[in-house]
Image (cartoon, rainbow, N blue to C red):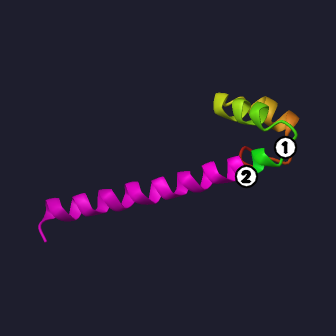
Amino acid sequence: MNTNTETLRLMIAAVTEERERLQGEYNAVIDYAIETDDPAAFLRTWREGDVETLTNEWPDFKAYN
């Protein structure tokens, strides 16, 4: 196997691993949101990256703690 092919294989493996990690994080956020009193407000706050509100309004959400 030449160097370019090996490099490409390693890059694809790294991207695949990162995609799977992110998918797991997104699933955890959605699972958490479903259990809140206001899933839309939680998801909006999370999407906007408002860490202060997340930690104040949903202190048991552990992604940023």
* Vertical relation: 7 (above or below) 40: below
* Vertical relation: 11 (above or below) 54: below
Q: Nearer the viewer, residue 26 or 38?
A: 38
Is residue 54 rendered to the left or right of residue 47? right
- Total marks in image: 2
The quarter of the picture where the N terminus appears is bottom left
Q: Quadrant of residue 10?
A: bottom left
Q: Single out the residue that lies furthest toward the bottom.
A: 1
Q: Percent from the top left, x then y, of residue 53?
A: 80, 30
The amino acid sitting under disc 1 is Thr
Q: Residues within 10 Å of mark 2 (few under 14, many from 20)?
A: few
The amino acid sitting under disc 2 is Asp
The label on residue 31 is 2
Q: Percent from the top left, x then y, of residue 37?
A: 88, 40
Q: Single out the residue that lies furthest toward the left.
A: 2
- Residue at 82% x, 37% y is 55
Q: Cα distance, mark 2 to mark 1?
A: 9 Å
The label on residue 36 is 1
Q: Nearer the viewer, residue 29 or 6?
A: 29
Is residue 61 rendered to the left or right of residue 20? right
Magenta segment main secondary structure:
helix
